[in-house]
Image (spheres, helix red, strand yellow):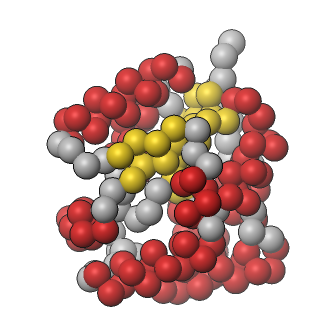
Amino acid sequence: MSRAIVGFTGMPGAGKSEAVSIAKSLGFEIVSMGDVVREEAIKRGIPLEDSRIGRFATEEREKHGNDIWAKRTADKVKGNFIVIDGIRSIDEVESFRREFGKDFVLIAIYTKGEERLQRILRRAREDDVRNMEELENRDERELGWGIGNAIAKADIMIVNDSTLEDFRGRVKKMLLKLK
C-alpha cells in the first residue's frame, strides 16, 4: 500500500486552509500544526490571541529546539494519506523528512501580501491579524522561524494568484497524483 504524507507551508493567508479542505475532500486525514500549538496553549492557560500564541510557540522552540512542533505533530500522524498543515521552518521540514522519509512531500503555496490580508480578514479566525501592520509583524515572526527557507525547499510550489476555481483544480490535480 502506498503512503503520502503531504506538508503544506506558506505565509499566513496564502491558501493553505483551502488546500487542506481539498485534501480532506479527497480522503486525506488532516493534522494541523497550528491546532497542536493551540491545544498546548489551551492546556497551559494561554489566551488565543495571535501575539500570545506566537510568543508561546517561539518560547517552546527556544526551550525544546526549532523542530519541537514537528515532533509533537508527528506523534499525531497515523494512516497512509495525511496532510500536515502549517509547517513554519526548515527544521520542521527536516524533522518530517527524517520521520517519514520518501513518503513526505512538501508543497508551498504563495500569494502576495495584500491578497493574503483580505483572505485573513474574510476568514475571521479568533487568533488572526486584523490589519496590514499586524500581518507584517506576523510575517516577520514566521520569517524569523525560517518559513522562507521551508518555502524555498518545497518539492512543489503552487502560486495562488488566479481564481479560486483554478487554484482548487491545481491543488486537486497535484494531490491526486500523490495519492
Q: Which of the pair 127/97 is nearer the observer?
A: 97
In the rendered image of this protein, does residue 160 appear above or below residue 47? above
Query: In the rendering, at what x and y percent does residue 161 appear?
Result: 25, 49
Query: In the rendering, at what x and y percent does residue 152 appear?
Result: 57, 53
In the rendered image of this protein, does residue 55 appear above or below residue 33? below
Q: Residue placed at 62% from the left, 28% from the top?
A: 4
Q: Which of the pair 6/155 is nearer the observer?
A: 155
Q: Which of the pair 60/173 is nearer the observer?
A: 173
In the rendered image of this protein, does residue 76 appear above or below residue 49? above
In the rendered image of this protein, does residue 106 appear above or below residue 174? below
Q: Residue placed at 40% from the left, 42% from the top?
A: 158
Q: Residue placed at 75% from the left, 51% from the top?
A: 94
Q: Which of the pair 96/53 is nearer the observer?
A: 96
Tell me if residue 36 can be seen: no
Residue lying at the far front of the rendered structure: 152
**Quadrant where the N terminus is found in the figure:** top right
Give the image quarter of residue 127: bottom left
Query: Tag count in the figure?
Result: 0
Query: In the rendering, at what x and y percent does residue 72 appear?
Result: 73, 58
Asked whether, in this view, residue 121 is left or right of residue 171, the answer is left
Residue lying at the far top of the rendered structure: 1
Tell me if residue 161 can be seen: yes
Asked whether, in this view, residue 110 is left or right of residue 31, the answer is left
Give the image quarter of residue 133: bottom left
